[in-house]
Image: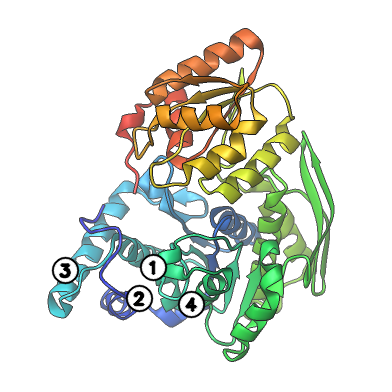
Amino acid sequence: MFDLPKYGEGICLARLAELLETLGIDRKRLGERSVAITGSNGKGSTAAFCAAIARAYGLRTGLFTSPHLFHFNERFQIDGTPIDDEVLKSQEARTKAAIDTISSRRGEIFGAFEAMFALACLYFQESECDFLAFEAGIGGRYDPVRVLGALVASVTSVDYEHVELLGSSLQLIVSDKSDACACGGTIIYGENCRSLRPHIVEYNRNRDIQSLFVRDEIEIGAESIETGGTSFDLTFGKHRFHGLKPALPGAFQFNNAAIAAAMFLRWLEGARPEASADTIEAAVRSGLRDTRWPGRLEAIAHDPLTVIDVGHTPDAITQSLNGLRQTYGQGGWILVLGVSFDKKAEEIAQALAPAFDTIICTAAHHKGSDARALATLVRNIHPTAEVRIALPIEQAFETSRSIAASRQRKIYVAGGLFTAIEYAATARGLNARDLAFF
């Protein structure tokens, strides 16, 4: 979709504002109905939780996320349903026509993510959505989500990523992400941002932004992780919820679920101040319980148990590995490992390899790094492990299932988004080569 480069030329805000105006987007109206989700890890899960809560409250809810996993339509959802193919084609044509006109006049090249964001705004406006959750692409200062002027935003976590764009320190990175929120608004910060609190508070002060932090103003307690699921208590302002049960596994999801609930509650205070406490609590409970977000510690098969995770940064992978042990048990796993060529293979291997005695190294068709070089890394990190190379991903699927069946093992597929999704596609009987990623 969109014959455009991934990123456009320079800073996109002015041309994007012109594009939205050309498409007839009422930015003020959309901004009043929107929350913006930024962060290094956890954005997608947080956005999904927040949208599910809004939907449970009875609001027609739009959700814009990236990347997609199996189908491009997944990026644009209303009430949990991806955009219809025909509607997508129609709105793509309208968006492209407007882009062509503006690009010709301004002499600037749009990026594909800008085009997708504009299409999402058009789709949600014409579908008369009541609530919108927009996941940022990179950062916040120059990300398309900023042009909506949302008064409620989040920074789910902060890590060293895209340093050439966002800055070489965590202070610079969190500052950039914080700029997605409009002046006078509220930003909910995830737990790992707390060490940056003095900087964040001062950075936000002159824009009159309230900075709220998970485990400080947003209290989490009574955390429980068992094979049957997870639960926790949440206190935020006047709201006290006991025994919330988020559907997504892993202790790291407590942070994401708490951020999502706090974002929706803060948005609701401004948009629907008359809301009853019982209705709010019911929405938070059922929204967290019913959230579906594939690829995050997702069990895609049970004979043998097969779990995939699309995390692709060392921090996300470490959190997911901990979640795997807590949720599905510690021992008896085979690791299917593949890393994209533009990711930190050595750090990812360091995070995963020591925990497994049987490791199958492979490479996704899309952006897969050299499986043999990866196997060498793994052998150096874990000399006593049984390390195999299985190419292509379809062979890794067959090999892992064969070993799991003969040894009564479970399978964990991790290291990169493309590896996990291509493996899952193969399990579904699809051709992994046919998947179209962006």
Q: Is residue 177 above or below residue 57?
A: below
Q: Are marks 2 and 4 in contact (CB under 8 Å)?
A: no
User: What is the number of the mark on residue 25?
Assistant: 2
Contact? badges 3 and 4 (CB < 8 Å): no
Q: Which residue is mark 3?
A: 100
Residue closest to the eye, 10 or 3: 10
Residue drawn where x is 52% and y is 82% of the image: 182
Q: Is residue 201 above or below residue 428?
A: below
Say left or right for 406 vs 98: right
Asked if residue 78 lies left or right of residue 206, the reply is left
In the picture shown, does residue 437 fall above or below 217?
A: above
The amino acid type of the residue labelled 1 equals Cys
Dot 1 or dot 3: first in sequence order is: 3
Q: Earlier in the sequence, mark 1 or mark 4?
A: 4
Q: CA distance from mark 1 to mark 2?
A: 7 Å
Find disc 1 in the rendering and name its residue.
121
**Which comes sooner in the sequence, label 3 or label 2?**
2
The residue singled out by tag 4 in the image is 31
Q: Give the residue type at disc 3.
A: Asp
